């Protein structure tokens, strides 16, 4: 694996990175300002975790595919370690989740598609700008979720904002909603297929998507 110290930046320069466990790993940082950065163009593929980030992470112009999990945010519930910024990133065709355990996710001009599990999970607030999440086996994006070591799920009211984005056609294997959030999502010039509130009995829809 390529291991990045806090504040380091990896330039892929058109190369492909692969490994059995983590293709790229970001070490934890005790300083909130320290960010792990991965700059494309390039590919990350063939690993258990394409990127395993234990610090803030910025990924730009990279295709992440053919892994078990595309991006694993190790400490998604710790704010200064958790933020994930994606710009012009494609996360596709991973056998599990596209993004697992994310904190606050900021995705711009990004596509998360055709992954076997959830498109993206985030504990913190998330914002999608000109981003598409489609064709994933489970939910499109789940916000306010924390998965502890016992695999139990806890939900908090975290914001989910879509601007000029589309989250639809997910839940192919388990009929999960496209948007799963404990707080009403906000959509601006955006579309989604279905939504659900996981904290209410029966997981009712929020009434913000076309199929609600």
Image: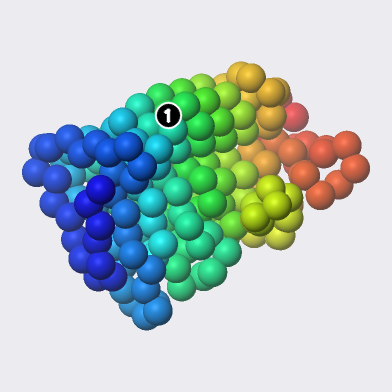
Name the residue at 69% across, 23% down. 174
Residue nearer the viewer, 181 or 211: 181
Residue 1 horizontal side relative to residue 124, left or right? left
The residue drawn where x is 51% and y is 36% is 97
Indicate the position of residue 188 as horizontal and vertical percent values: 54, 45
Residue 91 in sight from this viewpoint: no
Residue at the far top in the pictured view: 172
At numbered mark 1, what does the secondary structure look like: helix, strand or loop? loop
The tally of labels here is: 1
Q: Residues within 10 Å of mark 1 (few under 14, many from 20)?
A: many
Q: Which residue occupies the extreme right position in the image?
A: 201
Q: Nearer the viewer, residue 125 or 15?
A: 15
Does 62 sit left or right of 185 as displayed? left
Residue under label 1 = 94
Return the x and y of residue 112 as percentages of the image width and height: 43, 34
Give me the residue at 17% from left, 35% from top.
16
Above or below, 143 relative to 191? below
Q: Is residue 148 above or below residue 194?
A: below
Q: To which quarter of the image does residue 168 belong?
A: top right
Above or below, 97 against 159 in this view is above
In this view, the residue farthest toward the front is 20
Classify residue 180 by image quadrant.
Answer: top right
Picture coordinates of residue 93 (x, y %)?
40, 24
């Amino acid at each position: 694996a390529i291991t990045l110290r806090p504040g380091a930046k990896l330039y892929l320069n058109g190369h492909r990175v692969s490994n059995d466990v983590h293709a790229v790993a970001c070490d934890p940082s005790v300083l909130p300002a320290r960010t792990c950065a991965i700059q494309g163009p390039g590919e990350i593929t063939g690993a258990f975790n394409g990127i395993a980030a234990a610090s803030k992470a910025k990924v730009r112009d990279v295709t992440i595919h053919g892994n078990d999990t595309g991006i694993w945010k190790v400490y998604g519930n710790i704010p200064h370690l958790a933020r994930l910024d994606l710009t012009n990133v494609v996360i596709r065709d991973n056998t599990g989740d596209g993004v697992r355990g994310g904190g606050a996710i900021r995705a711009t001009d990004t596509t998360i598609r055709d992954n076997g599990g959830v498109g993206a999970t985030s504990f913190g607030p998330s914002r999608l700008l000109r981003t598409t999440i489609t064709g994933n086996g489970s939910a499109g994006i789940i916000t306010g979720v924390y998965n502890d070591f016992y695999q139990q799920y806890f939900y908090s009211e975290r914001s989910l904002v879509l601007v000029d984005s589309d989250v639809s056609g997910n839940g192919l294997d388990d009929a999960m909603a496209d948007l799963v959030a404990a707080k009403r999502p906000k959509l601006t010039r955006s579309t989604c297929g279905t939504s659900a509130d996981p904290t209410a009995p029966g997981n009712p829809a929020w009434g913000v998507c076309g199929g609600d």
